[in-house]
Amino acid sequence: MIKILIELPTWLGDAIMASPAIENLISYCNDPVVTLIGSDVAVSALKNNPRVFKIIVLDKKFRNLYKQKTLGEFDLFVSFRGSIRSKLLLSFVSAKNKFQYDKRKYKKTHQVEKYNSFINECLGKNDFAGELKLFNTININNNKNKILGINPGASYGSAKRWDAKEFAKVACDLSSQYDIVILGGPAEKDIAADIEKYLIEKNINNYQNLASKTTISELIDKISQLDLFITGDSGPMHVAAAFKVSTVAIFGPTNDSETSQWLNEKSVIVKKNLECQPCMKRTCPLKHQNCMKLIKASDVLEAVKNMN
């Protein structure tokens, strides 16, 4: 039995993009027993892996990191984070072998490959990065109609958010073919309400607004049932990739070569390819946000049409 402690990336999308590397790590070790530590979002997403014995939600307060000394002895500790707090955690954890991710070492490849290269380096291996792995049960859509998911959120910053009215226009146009589910966390409550308001104005009633009303596990379950997903570059986008959901992903300031859906043949990217893209900024440094504002509902609807 090999006891492994894995500190997950903080964000939902990053945690899911680390899953192929984690699978390669687990498959390399003989009879592994895994403890996951990290943010509530991250551990909630990956806790159903059958090799996971225990999960720990990491307290954000620095002074509480010392408590991790009580976790016991591990054979291996791998951290997918390079922050100061993670370096402190590394010093407190008792493990025979310790490794910490350094993002400066891995550049110009997809984030999945960056994490996988890190694990390959730790183990002295050269394994390929496989598919994203979520072990939640895939739910069957028993509805009469197909389901369209709308995800207007983007935790990274406002620069990644597409306009609520454009999302709503897409939903209205497709409402005769799909029932609509609006998804998101607490930060998306307001933009989801704006989308809902527009749907009501257009007399669209075959929708649910579940923004801020689901746990991470429930969000994953809902996405697994979708027939089509319209989303920005976000954590839920990677959930959809894990379940091979047909997806139109709207990209603005971020780099789609690094954070697009991994190994989902049913994925289409909509972006404008401006000279200022990708700036990788949380707010638009040029104050116009044209990389998102120039994308219209018609662009997304055309992408949907070309998928069929």
Image: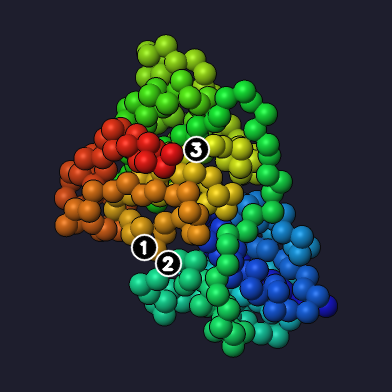
Look at mark 1 in the image and give the residue it sits on: 257
Does the CB distance between marks 1 and 2 fall below 8 Å?
yes
Question: Which quarter of the rendered picture does the N terminus lie within?
Answer: bottom right
Q: Position of residue 195 (x, y in %)?
A: 40, 25
Q: Position of residue 80 (x, y in %)?
A: 55, 70
Instruction: Report the residue at 49% width, 44% height from top.
Output: 246
Q: Is residue 235 left or right of residue 72?
A: left
Look at mark 2 in the image and give the residue it sits on: 110
State how far apart marks 1 and 2 are (Cα).
6 Å
Q: Secondary structure at mark 3?
A: strand
Q: Earlier in the sequence, mark 1 or mark 3?
A: 3
State how far apart marks 2 and 3 are (Cα).
24 Å
Q: Earlier in the sequence, mark 2 or mark 3?
A: 2
Look at mark 3 in the image and give the residue it sits on: 228
* Three-letter amino acid code of the residue under disc 1: Ser
Q: Position of residue 131 (x, y in %)?
A: 58, 62
* Three-letter amino acid code of the residue under disc 3: Leu
Q: Residue furthest bottom?
A: 124
Instruction: Report the residue at 64% width, 54% height from top.
Output: 134
**243 vs 78: above or below:** above
Quarter location, residue 202: top left
Q: Position of residue 85 (x, y in %)?
A: 52, 68
